[in-house]
Amino acid sequence: MKLTAVKTLVTSKFGRQVLQVRKHSPVLLFGAGIVGVVATAVLASRATLKLDETLDETNYDLDRIRDSVIHENYSETDRQRDMAIVYAKAAGKVARLYGPSMLIGMASVAALTGSHVILTRRNTAIMAAYAVLDRGWREYRARVVNELGVDKDLEFRHGTTLCLADEVDVENGITPGTIVGKMVGGASVYARFFDEFSPNWEKAPGYNSMFLSCQQNFANDLLRSRGHVFLNDVYDMLGIPRSKEGAVAGWIYDLKNKEIDNRIDFGIFDVNQHEGMRFVLGHNDAVLLDFNVDGLIWDKI
C-alpha cells in the first residue's frame, strides 16, 4: 500500500509539473526564442571573424592549382578536379563555422513560431467560450423580456430600485410615495465613473453633461459610418483608461439584427435614470456611465 501511495504521489506531482510547463509554454518558448536569437548573432559574429582565415587558405590552394603546369601526368581534368575538391573543403569549413549559429537560429524561429501558434489557439478558444457565454446571456435576457417585460429585464440586470418622493410637491402634483425615478443599484463590468479623475472633466456641471452628450452623438455617428465601435474607442473619447474587455466588446450596426440597439447609450440621459438626471441637471459632480454594450463583437466584424 505504501509503495502504491508513493507512486501515486510521484505521478501526481509529475503530472502537475507537466501541466505547469504546458500552461506557461508560450512564455517559455518566447524566452527561449529571444535567447536563441541573441546566441545566433553572437555565434555568427564569432564565425565571421574566422572566415577570413578560411578564405585565405582556400585562395592559396586555388592559386597553387591555377599555377600548376599542365603535363602528361597532370591534365586539365585533374586541375578541375582539384579545384572542385578545394571548393568542397571550403564549403565544409564555412558550414562548420556557421552551422551552430544556423541551427540555433532555426530553433529560435521555431520557438517563437510555436509561442505564437499556442497563443493564437488559446485566444481563439477564449473568444469561442466568450461567444457561448454571451449568446447564453442574451437568450436568458430574451426569455425575461418575453415573460416579464423590458422594465423587469433592466431591473434584474442593473439592480434598479424605484425612487419614491418623501415630500409633497403641489406644483408638480407629487405626493409622498409617488415614483419619481429609478436608481441603479448595480452596474455592468463595462461601467466607468466620469469624475474629476478624467482629463475631460470640468468643474462646471453644464460643461460635463454637454461634453458627454456630444461624445455620445459622435460615437453613434462613428458606429453608423464604420459599422462597429469598440468599447475602448469610447473610453478613449472620454479619457477613461482602456480595459481588456473593451478590446473585444463593443457595438455593431446592423438594422437587420433585432437583438441589438443599433445605437450607443451612456445610460445617463434617460429621464427615468435618477442618478444620471441628477448629474445632467448639475446636482452631482460625477456619474457612473453604464454603456449598453452589444457584447463580444470581435468575431462579428
Image (cartoon, rainbow, N blue to C red):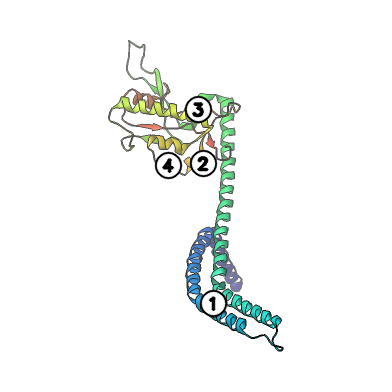
Cα gap from disc 2 to disc 1, whole angstroms: 57 Å
Toward the viewer: 77 or 50? 77
Q: Are marks 4 and 1 in contact (CB under 8 Å)?
A: no
Q: Position of residue 110 (x, y in %)?
A: 58, 62
- Which amino acid, mark 1? Leu
Q: Position of residue 198 (x, y in %)?
A: 34, 37
Mark 4 vs mark 2: which is more N-terminal?
4
Q: Secondary structure at mark 1?
A: helix
Label of residue 263 in the image: 3
Q: Position of residue 112 (x, y in %)?
A: 54, 59
Cα gap from disc 4 to disc 3, whole angstroms: 21 Å
Identify the residue at image location x=51%, y=29%: 225
Toward the viewer: 229 or 2? 229
Q: Are marks 4 and 3 in contact (CB under 8 Å)?
A: no
Q: Is residue 200 visible in this depiction of the protein?
A: yes
Label of residue 55 in the image: 1
Q: Badge 1, how many Cα within 10 Å: few under 14, some, many 20+?
A: some
- Which amino acid, mark 2? Val
Q: Secondary structure at mark 2?
A: loop
Toward the viewer: 115 or 10? 115
Report which quarter residue 95 is drawn in.
bottom right
Label of residue 224 in the image: none
Q: Are marks 3 and 1 in contact (CB under 8 Å)?
A: no
37 above or below 131? below
Cα gap from disc 3 to disc 2, whole angstroms: 17 Å
Q: Which residue is mark 4?
A: 242
Label of residue 248 in the image: 2
